[in-house]
Image (cartoon, helix red, strand yellow):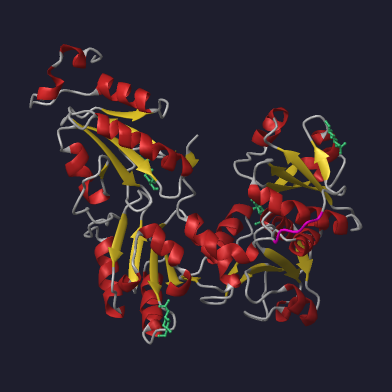
Amino acid sequence: MATRVSNGLFVFVSSLFILLNVSISAAAEGEYVLTLDSSNFSETVSKNNFVVVEFYAPWCGHCKKLAPEYEKAASILSSHDPPVILAKVDANDEANKELASEFQISGFPTIKILRNGGRNAQEYKGPRDADGIVTYLQKQAGPASAEIKSVEDAGSVIDEKKIFVVGVFPEFSGEAFENFTILAEKLRSDYDFGHTLDAKLIPRGESSVDRPTLRLLKPFDELFVDFQDFEVDAMEKFVEVASVPIMTIFNNDPSNHPFVIKFFNSPNAKAMLFLNFSSELADAFKSKYNDVAGLYKGKGVSFLLGDLEYSQGAFQYFGLKDDQAPVIIIQNNNGQKYLKPNLEPDHITPWLKEYMDGNLKPFVKSEPIPEADNEPVKVVVADSLQDKVFNSGKNVLLEFYAPWCGHCKKLAPILDEVAVSFENDADVIIAKLDATANDIPNDTFDVQGYPTLYFKSASGNLLQYDGDRTKEDIIEFIKKNQDKTSQPDPVKAEPNSVKDEL
Ligand SMILES: *[C@@H]1O[C@H](CO)[C@@H](O)[C@H](O)[C@H]1NC(C)=O
Ligand SMILES: *[C@@H]1O[C@H](CO)[C@@H](O)[C@H](O)[C@H]1NC(C)=O
Ligand SMILES: *[C@@H]1O[C@H](CO)[C@@H](O)[C@H](O)[C@H]1NC(C)=O
Ligand SMILES: *[C@@H]1O[C@H](CO)[C@@H](O)[C@H](O)[C@H]1NC(C)=O
């Protein structure tokens, strides 16, 4: 019954995507969305070429918000030719769990597009408002690649702010063209595709090509790249790499959002520079940072430049203060962070070099160590974790909590009572750590939700407490697991006090 820790870095991105959220409308539960369950799922899907299935859970708020929009989209699409069928499955229902696991559903809502009688399943990556759903699905239900026969065609299918992949062929047949079609089918939910016989119709790049060519148009860096290996995997890899900007921009421009998502999904270490885009030095920063990003391209680090104005979530997540900006932070794949506050343009190159050479010391987010710590439950922060918990020689019960967590608020007075009951036992400390404001060494503590309670005995035994959160049970657990420290404690001289020790 712990509150789940929310999804790491994505927390701060999500605040930016309010734009994409749907409005709650009062539309009644309708009849256009088919309800499917394990008894009739296969039958319905196998009969149709194009079925969209929402896996939802009754308690999920985002699903409730989506429902009226999804229904509205289903009603509009019911007259589409050929038909586009929208369905839903209650993945929380025990009877449908197997279905949900078959489609690897791990969050709600998850929407899948099933083609060819269900033989091909793709993630829905479109918007969540009715009009957006309709536009996206109409496109998904059509051909994966649009033929470009004129400059007008090109103008209508190529969005200059997005990635567009176009295949140029001497004829629409042959292995290269077939492989291109496979690629377009495979990646259609992520990129827009087109094909043409005439390179002159494409807005960028050489206007004549003498052999099949894949041309990727992008709104950043070199603006287009050509590729001529039509092996499917090679093309897929090319598209993945070529569609990542040297430097991802994080601001309020929605056309940047797909690249921000890509940035956070990347397996690379992540360098993030936050500064006020309106400041005088912004251009100097951008140009230096872009140079460095270009220099380290392909070396395992991705680069993001964020506007301070829209980076409050990131600042909270990393425990940064506005007066530290301009600031650069690198988070590597072991969760270690490196920080340089009050950055100047000329610091960027040498600091990155120090990072690449492994000369920087990781940064640990911590609240200040409190000066007075007089309450029964002691306050531990990242900077005092070693001294107060590991090197204290005491038995310590440590609560990891979040200020907003209801279960933690309920536990607080109980922990107070536990602490009071051990007040005369100098061997036992009850402590708490705000896990949202302090980094926790995750190789030591596995904190998946709040509150999480750990007990470290005086001799260093570490146990997670997963008993009931009552005063009695917690006290009993501590008494059972505590070690006596070297200093005898007069209050605990009664023979009974050690009866529960192992
Ligand atoms: C599938 O079966 C459920 C009951 O098991 C029913 O409520 C639902 O309407 C059925 N859906 C279709 C499309 O037949
Ligand atoms: C098409 O793709 C297949 C499989 O990826 C590959 O073996 C073949 O060489 C490709 N054809 C061309 C013309 O690149
Ligand atoms: C950014 O700088 C501009 C101009 O100096 C200023 O008006 C604005 O308040 C700053 N924004 C932030 C978030 O500090
Ligand atoms: C600690 O967290 C990092 C990043 O969040 C992760 O890559 C790493 O595997 C974690 N380590 C352990 C022991 O869980």
Whether residue 466 is visible, yes or no, is: yes
Could you tell whether 28 is left or right of 19 in the image? right
* Residue at position x 25%, y 44% in the image: 375
The magenta stretch spans which residues? 23-27
Q: Residue furthest bottom?
A: 280
Give yes or no for residue 193 being in the magenta stretch.
Answer: no
* Residue at position x 69%, y 43% in the image: 56
Judging depth in this view, the residue of 435 and 445 nearest the camera is 435
Dominant SS of magenta comes to: loop
Q: Quadrant of ligand 4?
A: top left
- Residue 479 position within the rendered picture, expressed as x and y whole percent measured from the top left: 26, 21
**Image quarter of residue 401:** top left
* Residue at position x 31%, y 45% in the image: 433
Judging depth in this view, the residue of 375 and 310 nearest the camera is 375
* Residue at position x 32%, y 39% in the image: 443
Could you tell whether 484 is left or right of 420 in the image? left
Give yes or no for residue 25 being in the magenta stretch.
Answer: yes
Q: Reply above or below: 197 against 76.
A: below
Number of callouts in the render? 0
Q: Reply above or below: 459 against 141.
A: above
Could you tell whether 428 is left or right of 337 in the image? left
- Residue 349 position within the rendered picture, expressed as x and y whole percent measured from the top left: 29, 73
Picture quarter with the C terminus: top left
- Residue 91 position within the rendered picture, expressed as x and y whole percent measured from the top left: 69, 37
Whether residue 241 is visible, yes or no, is: no
**Image quarter of residue 321:** bottom left
- Residue 269 position within the rendered picture, expressed as x and y whole percent measured from the top left: 39, 57
Judging depth in this view, the residue of 356 and 100 nearest the camera is 100
Judging depth in this view, the residue of 69 and 270 nearest the camera is 69
**Image quarter of residue 228:** bottom right
